[in-house]
């Protein structure tokens, strides 16, 4: 009895484990990976896969820049994006504040391995200007976000290494190290915490070219859209070296808005409102 | 107001408002803009005793915008006003824009007063021709008057095609007798003449095709109509004083624009071929902008600019840039206040003539922008089209409040 009981329990356990593993193998084949590099890549691919199919998105963003003394400066930005198959996403960023740059807009065609194509629209002159996208490490509008932090995420831009499992703020996470492939990146590496439940980035640490901790980004208040896609309401970037911080507050997320290529060209940049 | 053409312009603006579909739902109007106060100080003794050394001015530009049909139709009205001390010709109002834009699948039409910029280079805008220059507003010629137009734009895989019907011509504005930064003798718009009997009602047309091929942006354009740049003819005004009278000729201009991005390098080239203004001629400007990112381990960027100007009319050129080199530095602090410095000099390769400028701007608080500019004009030869302003070195301080 005892023995068979044990056997039954053991058998049950095995079956249960197996079904979990089978289930996971279609969702996240993480458990089967051998090297930390493969595991890291698989976690990031799964995170990317879960965020595929949103087609196009629109959202409003308020950016609060704070210096060491606590002085604040506000930017108000609208962001539009178009999901591309087999290429990086297209993005349109329109400034509403500060008021002296109202109407200024950025158009970006991001690419996985090639440099991004970028244009800037200057409303006072009505001028569309091609700009160099090599400047990845520079600050975005004086904030603690670099251009590369704001650009669309493509799996191929980094190589990966799974580090460990860790619980932060009560959330079970996979911890993955990412190494930028682009030599113009301002970072040697990033460490990202993905929650195990939904593969959403919860925290990113950025290490500068000297491999010292430069910044930490926290994501909070994720909301789900169209029953699938998770978007954070808050992103809080803290620069440990300067004491400055930038808080992004997102609102009015809309996905699958029906936009097309035609909403992301130099012509649409000129009339971005 | 001194601008004799304002009534016609206002009529055009009203016509646009009337032409827009009458069923504009009572949408929310977005109102934004600025009011500014500026002070210009000229450090050298004026060429003419009527001219002053110090000018205070105020101005404002307001944009009223509304959209309907889910953003497929928009209406933009942007009046501008400048009131200046001493120089009555600088007192002017303009509608920089007053147009209705209809956006459809892959095409759009803009009707009314609007502003269009063509070009890629920094130190001279050769190809840019749709709008007339507002010659009393800024010293750099980048301020433009609203141009009446019907502009049809088509977006296709093979590029963007833009077609223009420009039904009414606007004369260039020039400073008055008491104003600085003017020719000697002064240019008097009241004595403007035209090659075409239709004068300002001459129907002008233009087309531009632009496309992006990877790292290369290119555009080819053609303009047929009244030259925005007048020929200046010595004449007498009604009191017998010697003046320069603008004469507007009929021209054809073909333009080419190229810009190529390679890493930190941005290469730029513009060329025109123009006929109808004396001998047919060619002119070009080309160069680069190279950006040093994060200089000296800071967040600052330093841009190095160089451009070469060429005009095959040589010393007969009506523009000052026939064989000149532009060198510039752009320092961007990338701070929360968006502080920027731009310094440049244009050297005449044939003479020791040079013109230079420094521009600096920063934001104070959320709504105030402070700009400081200085310009100098040195050793210009007597045949240089800019000779009239050789004694007009000046500094400008401007405070603009945005709302």
Image (spheres, rainbow, N blue to C red):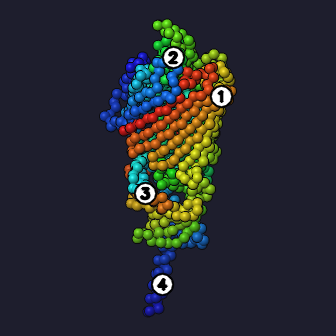
Q: CA distance from mark 2 to mark 1?
A: 25 Å
Q: Which tag is nearer the camera, tag 4 or tag 3?
A: 3
Q: Position of residue B86 (x, y in %)?
A: 41, 22
State the residue at coordinates (55%, 60%): A208
Q: Mark 2 or mark 1, which has the lower sequence index?
A: 2
Q: CA distance from mark 2 to mark 4?
A: 102 Å
Which chain letter matches label 4? A
Q: CA distance from mark 4 to mark 3?
A: 59 Å
Q: Check contact, mark 4 vs mark 1: CB within 8 A.
A: no
Report the residue marked by disc 4. Answer: A10
State the residue at coordinates (44%, 69%): A168
Q: Quadrant of residue A224?
A: bottom left
- As rendered, which of B96 and A67 lies closer to the eye? A67
Q: Mark 4 or mark 3, which has the lower sequence index?
A: 4
Task: Name the image quarter holding the N terminus of chain A.
Answer: bottom left
State the residue at coordinates (39%, 30%): B58
Q: Give the structural element (helix, strand or loop) at label 2.
A: loop
Q: Is residue B271 above or below residue B299?
A: above
Q: CA distance from mark 1 to mark 3?
A: 50 Å
Q: Check contact, mark 4 vs mark 3: CB within 8 A.
A: no
Report the residue marked by disc 1. Answer: B352
Q: Give the structural element (helix, strand or loop) at label 4.
A: helix
Q: Give the structural element (helix, strand or loop) at label 1.
A: loop
Q: Is residue B121 above or below residue A43?
A: above
Report the residue marked by disc 3. Answer: A68
Q: Is residue B104 above or below residue B183?
A: below
Label placed on residue B186:
2
Q: For mark 1, does the 10 Å Cα neighbourhood hold few (<14), some (14 to 19), or many (20 or more) residues?
A: few
Q: Quadrant of residue B91?
A: top left
């Amino acid at each position: 009895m005892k023995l068979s009981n044990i056997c039954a329990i053991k058998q049950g356990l095995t079956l249960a484990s197996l079904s979990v593993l089978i289930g996971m193998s279609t969702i996240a084949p993480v458990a089967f990976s051998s090297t930390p590099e493969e595991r890291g890549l698989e976690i990031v691919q799964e995170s990317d896969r879960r965020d595929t199919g949103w087609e196009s998105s629109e959202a409003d963003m308020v950016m609060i820049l704070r210096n060491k003394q606590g002085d604040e400066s506000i930017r108000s930005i609208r962001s539009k994006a178009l999901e591309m198959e087999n290429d990086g996403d297209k993005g349109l960023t329109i400034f509403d504040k500060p008021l002296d740059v109202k109407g200024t807009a950025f158009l970006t065609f991001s690419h996985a391995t090639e440099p991004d194509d970028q244009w800037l629209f200057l409303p006072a002159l009505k001028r569309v200007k091609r700009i160099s996208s090599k400047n990845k490490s520079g600050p975005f509008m004086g904030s603690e976000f670099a251009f590369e932090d704001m650009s669309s995420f493509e799996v191929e831009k980094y190589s990966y290494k799974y580090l460990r499992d860790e619980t932060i703020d009560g959330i079970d996470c996979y911890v993955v190290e990412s190494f930028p492939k682009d030599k113009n990146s301002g970072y040697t590496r990033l460490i990202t915490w993905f929650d195990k439940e939904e593969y959403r980035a919860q925290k990113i640490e950025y290490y500068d070219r000297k491999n010292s901790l430069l910044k930490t980004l926290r994501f909070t208040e994720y909301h789900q859209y169209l029953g699938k896609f998770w978007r954070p309401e808050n992103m809080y970037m803290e620069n440990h070296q300067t004491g400055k911080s930038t808080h992004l507050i997102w609102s009015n997320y809309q996905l699958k808005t029906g936009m097309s290529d035609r909403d992301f060209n130099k012509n649409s940049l000129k009339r971005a409102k | 107001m001194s601008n004799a053409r304002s009534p016609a312009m206002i009529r055009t603006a009203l016509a646009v408002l009337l032409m827009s579909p009458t069923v504009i739902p009572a949408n929310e109007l977005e109102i934004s803009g600025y009011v500014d106060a500026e002070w210009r100080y000229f450090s050298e003794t004026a060429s003419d005793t009527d001219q002053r050394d110090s000018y205070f001015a105020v101005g404002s530009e307001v944009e009223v915008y509304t959209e309907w049909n889910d953003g497929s139709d928009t209406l933009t009205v942007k009046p501008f006003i400048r009131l200046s001390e001493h120089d009555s010709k600088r007192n002017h109002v303009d509608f920089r824009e007053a147009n209705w834009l209809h956006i459809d699948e892959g095409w759009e039409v803009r009707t009314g007063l609007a502003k269009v910029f063509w070009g890629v280079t920094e130190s001279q805008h050769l190809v840019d021709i749709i709008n007339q220059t507002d010659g009393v507003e800024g010293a750099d010629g980048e301020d433009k008057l609203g141009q009446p137009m019907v502009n049809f734009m088509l977006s296709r895989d093979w590029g963007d095609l833009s077609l223009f019907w420009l039904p009414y011509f606007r004369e260039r504005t020039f400073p008055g007798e008491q104003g600085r930064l003017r020719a000697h003798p002064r240019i008097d718009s009241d004595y403007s003449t035209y090659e075409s009997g239709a004068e300002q009602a001459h129907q002008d047309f233009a087309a531009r095709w632009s496309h992006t091929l990877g790292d290369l942006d290119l555009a080819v354009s053609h303009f047929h109509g009244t030259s925005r740049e007048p020929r200046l003819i010595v004449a007498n005004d009604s009191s017998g004083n010697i003046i320069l009278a603008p004469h507007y000729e009929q021209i054809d201009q073909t333009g080419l624009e190229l810009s190529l991005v390679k890493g930190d390098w941005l290469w730029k080239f513009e060329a025109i071929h123009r006929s109808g203004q004396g001998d047919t001629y060619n002119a070009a400007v080309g160069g680069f902008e190279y950006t040093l990112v994060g200089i000296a381990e800071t967040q600052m960027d330093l841009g190095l600019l160089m451009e070469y100007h060429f005009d095959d009319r040589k010393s007969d050129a009506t523009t000052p840039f026939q064989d000149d080199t532009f060198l510039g530095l752009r320092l961007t602090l990338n701070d929360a206040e968006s502080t920027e410095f731009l310094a440049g000099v244009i050297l005449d390769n044939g003479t020791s003539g040079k013109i230079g400028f420094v521009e600096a701007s920063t934001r104070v608080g959320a709504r105030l922008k402070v700009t400081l500019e200085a310009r100098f004009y040195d050793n210009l030869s007597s045949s240089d089209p800019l000779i009239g302003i050789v004694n007009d070195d000046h500094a400008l301080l401007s405070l603009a409040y945005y709302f």
